[in-house]
Image (cartoon, coloured by chain):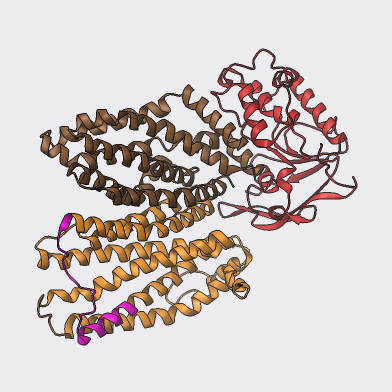
Chain colours: A orange, B brown, C red
Amino acid sequence: MFKWLDPYAKPETLYRICGLWFPWLMTAAVATLLLGNLWGLAFTPPDYQQGDSYRIIHIHVPSAIWSMGAYSSMAIAAFIALVWQVKAAQWAVGAIAPIGAVFTVIALFTGAAWGKPMWGTWWVWDARLTSQLILLFLYLGVIALAGAFADRQTGAKASALLAVVGVVNLPIIHFSVEWWNTLHQGATITKFAKPSIDASMLWPLLISILAFGLILAALTCLRLKTAILENEQHRPWVRQLAVSLAATPAKGSIAKSVTKEEV
Amino acid sequence: MVMFKAAFVREWRLLARQKADWLNPLMFFLIVLTLFPLGIGAKPNLLAEIAPGIIWIAALLSVLLGAERLFKDDYRQGVLEQLVAAEQPMLAYVLAKIVSSWCSTALPLLLMSPLIALLLGLDSAAWLAVFLTLLLGTPLLNLLASLGAALTLSADKGGILLALLILPLYIPLLIFASAAVDQASLGLDYSAQLAVLGAMLCLSLALVPLAVLKALKLNVG
Amino acid sequence: MRAVFSKSSADPVFTASNLCCVRQDRILFEAVNLHLAAGQLLQIGGKNGAGKSSLLRILAGLAQPDDGIVLWNEQPLADSDFSQHLCFIGHLSGIQPQLTALEHLEFWQASFGLKPADGYEVLAVLGLAGLEDIPCQLLSAGQQRRVSLARLWLTDRSLWILDEPFTALDQSAIVLLQRKFTEHLAQGGGIILTTHQPLTQHFPAAQLLELAYRW
């Protein structure tokens, strides 16, 4: 069914594709990020209830959404890697994991920063923040497992399996933490993601969400390129690439060009 | 079936000859349980309130402690690679391992549960809830622990990594099991929580052994 | 019923072409070709670290090659019934120290579908009479190796892949094992092994594949 995708799974092709996409994705990401965040942080009207402190929503909500989006993408790549034995998908798992983990940390910090003016404390065990914390542990687990093996390929495969196991557990964990929260916390706190949000605040939020998604895509391209080079370094096409790059030293550098014999 | 019986008999013999493999986690469980009143305070009201959580945390930690040995010896001695090469019914082998580890860690816990209830000041309704949640929950603990053991089989420093990977997956179990015992000590109905535990167990029984198989194969390869 | 290696003893049934293995980002070996027909013995030689065990694991279907393919009866290993014809004994002995030799045989018989046989007899042939009921940790390394090789006396599978089977064996055990190999080859089976022992005396028709040390 997916035979047409086969040529794209070749590391060399994938390397070129990522190289082509990366500049566009990065430019778009930076542009939308500046647009969305500047607009949201500086130019939207203050909330009638929370005043100015709600503005962090433009960072908190996109990073929270994409922390889960990154985990899903990672799990899809892991599934492809396990079922169809595609090596490039294994490397994609390792590429996405740290980005997702950083998004989760941003969501936690901004969530805490938002909490201070609203609840008076930096941390509260509410459903969302606790779920994010557990998601961070899941990410750290995937990253740790990949690095725990002497053979890098075994590590990549094991962490792919763990990512798939985690994604199955993710809804279960999410709902049980929500249920636990209603049990122990009493009334729910806010409706910051519910649709009763004014249009003037909605648009910068949506643009920020798009921006974070583009950042995820751009950084994944970059990390995947590095992973492909790392794992394929014994192949002739990588050697040729290294030779051609070394033969044209960067401006201002004092690197001598390397001859073929030395490589 | 033949394979399951042979593997189970083998596991049983190994456990009987290496008693430390199952006695140590049990002692760990009791000691951790004792640490809580010592660390937090032994007021009966306080103890009864935190007892459900303590029992379950101690149980999951002790299962994780004993999980590493599950496949490690067979991997180190080359038994696993022979089984994988011959593509033997590995599923039967894995199930035999999980069932025997459940028998060796959970059965003693279940038998000790009246003692635990006594130590933590739980009444008989709460004790019944502890017993039932342990009955439904410990297979789940063992299943996930075996997954962790299979994943970290050829990793260095596998032991603590195993715990780090599997503890987040234990959280839903912890939430529902301790809530069930909580409800019981308040005299309320807790069959809903038990049903959720049962559902999680069924899902794991269906999916986890396959994941364990995959993890074993990729570690041996 | 003994599994037959191939219909005609001249056809290679087990072939590998263009195998490549990468370890720690360096190529261990590449463009390795081999074939095996019924009644043939293939020895894989090379210095320590040349990749013999890695090659053997690829041939046994445990590991995937980074390039190339292994065929059994002209089908890729994963798609064929190869694993039912394979008896693999790796570098590790497969012996649990707490179990006795008889208990090992019992487990192997159940898990590998071996011929039902008298365990005492087999162990006596292997020179372990009187040691059947004690935990294997009390046996010497050579005796443990003899127990692990007992599978060969009980199996009816046609292809044997063995990694350093002569490790720790004394002279009489080596002779015993070589005789067993001759018997197996005469019955139409195939053997692939790695060893540092010279085999040419006993097996003049053996193929030798030398792996170059590339690190």
Rendered image quadrant of residue C209: top right
Which residue occupies the foreground of this view, C182 or B143?
B143
Rendered image quadrant of residue A252: bottom left
Which residue occupies the foreground of this view, B151 or A232?
B151
Note whether B94 is above or below A102 in the view shown: above
Q: Position of residue C126 (x, y in %)?
A: 73, 20
Question: Which quadrant of the figure contains the N terminus of chain A?
Answer: bottom right
Q: Position of residue B220 (x, y in %)?
A: 57, 44
Residue A200, magenta (yes or no) = yes
The magenta-colored residue range is A184-210
Residue A201, magenta (yes or no) = yes
Is A234 left or right of B211, judged from the image as shown? right
Is C211 left or right of A179, judged from the image as shown? right
Identity of the residue drawn at 31% across and 60% down: A174
Note whether A44 is above or below A231 in the view shown: below
Question: Which quadrant of the figure contains the C terminus of chain A?
Answer: bottom right
Is C125 left or right of B209, judged from the image as shown? right
Which residue occupies the foreground of this view, A9 or B24?
B24
| Residue B66 in view (yes/no) | yes
| Residue A229 in view (yes/no) | no
